[in-house]
Image: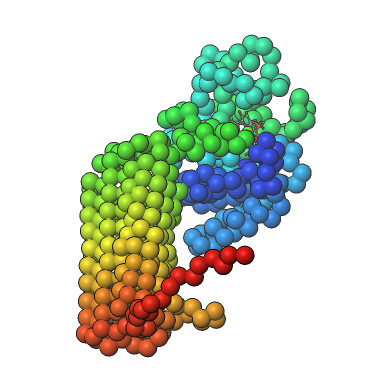
Amino acid sequence: MNVVILAAGMGKRMQSALPKVLHPLAGKPLLQHVIDTARSLKPSKLCVIYGHGGAAVPEMVAKLAESTGAAIDTALQQPQLGTGHAVMQAVPQIDDNAPTLVLYGDVPLTTADSLQRLVEAAGKDKLAILTVEQANPFGLGRIVRENGNIVRIVEEKDANEAERAIREINSGIMVIPTSRLKSWLESLSNNNAQGEYYLTDIVAKAVAEGVPVVSAQPSAEWEVAGVNSKVQLAELERRHQLNIANALLEKGVTLMDPARIDVRGELVCGRDVVIDVGCVFEGRVEIADGVSIGPNCVLVNARIGAGAQIKPFCHIEDAVVGDKSQIGPYARLRPGTQLGEDVHVGNFVEIKNSTVAAHSKANHLAYVGDATVGSRVNIGAGTITCNYDGANKFRTVIEDDAFIGSDSQLVAPVTVGAGATLGAGTTLTKDAPAGKLTISRPKQMTIENWKRPVKVKK
Ligand code: UD1
Ligand code: CA
């Protein structure tokens, strides 16, 4: 099968410099949703028609093709003279021996199942149209039937009153026998209300030539909803998020409110996972059995081990959290953080590019960057690894069972030996030997007979 995706339109109502099909839905460009769905049907040819927005659309397509190692053709439509004219641009690329599926780059949520049904309805030699009955069909092409058979499509602007009363609309998605399509496109005219070459005019041509025209229906109306404005984009985003939330619920995940979760990527959950309101998941996030995620957390490309608890307001990115760990509230795990089992990271603690082994704790107000932290280490409040001298980064090593007193600065590169204790307020510039107390604080003293200054009378 050939797939042609129309994506040359302007999208004026988006009120944006970004081409319409590149606006993200669930963190992914609209066009990429369509391409991903198209690819799941294993087409032999895939061609994206672009026009408005300059190089941005073909650049995005090229990147996608490169990252997945499968070819995607593009063809420029300039100027844009209608949907029929758009499909004409793909003619040199598509293969006569297989049918052609036409999709729109701004209709992101059509399911592969519905498209599969349409492809099956078309078989080898029929023209199949994805249609739906709409309560308000205004603006859309109407499916005109005689004795139940589709005879043509009429656009809103060309329709008479009786035709405008028809509720069955053309979604725009069709499967067409390709060699016929090519000859029909050659004979299209733009003699209509909009002066455009309508792809929809091929329907009457098919009927005239005795090619059967059939229809299939999507499982839900939102599957054929297009995006022409930010309002419609927002509506489809909510629809899509609700679909994702429902799929998570079906798999046994507890969502405190399925209307208040946003998944912009892939979220994989084990059994007995609880997710509170206002959480955002980006990239690939894996959550193991028995994890609870508190309200208002953001997790990006993260793995959370079994039984871990993520308390409210945490930001976790490119990080791994070990089983039974407790994170937050208000913790930040930055890229390269790997926490072992039962690690506790408390409020206002930031960890970056560091490993922290089992049972270690940093419960309050700390910065741990470029560090290797052993097991059962206690990192006191206010501890800072000074990993950066303004030019280069250095590592801090804290071995098993060390105790770092509050408000210490560890000036890297530096090592705290196993079982060492740092006194509170230590500025560590040389290694602290294992098992001993190291302290850099000046000795405390008290000045006898000292008096507070008093205000001088003028
Ligand atoms: C088209 C259909 C209409 C259908 C409606 C569904 C025609 C003539 N009409 O309407 O029956 O109900 O879609 O939304 O086909 N595009 C191009 N190049 C162009 C024109 C459009 O690539 O020259 C792309 C747009 O980017 C968009 C899609 O084709 O993705 C549909 O274009 P749009 O203008 O939204 O649809 P209509 O022509 O109004
Ligand atoms: Ca449209």
At 37% from the left and 41% from the top, the residue drawn is: 277
Between 93 and 264, which is closer to the camera in this rendering? 264
Give the residue drawn at x 59%, y 46%.
23
Is residue 97 in sight in this rendering? no
> Can the viewer see residue 291 in this picture?
yes
Q: Quadrant of the C terminus?
A: bottom right
* The quarter of the displayed image where residue 372 is located: bottom left
Q: Position of residue 90 (x, y in %)?
A: 65, 47
Q: Quadrant of ligand 1?
A: top right
Q: Nearer the viewer, residue 27 or 21?
A: 27
Q: Residue at x 58, y 21 (%)?
A: 137
Q: Name the side, left or right, on which 114 lies relative to 400.
A: right
Q: Is residue 163 left or right of residue 344?
A: right
Which of the 4 quarters of the picture holds residue 377? bottom left
All told, the count of numbered labels is 0
Q: Position of residue 161 (x, y in %)?
A: 67, 11
Q: Is residue 210 above or below residue 316?
A: above
Residue 241 percent across, percent down from the top left: 43, 39
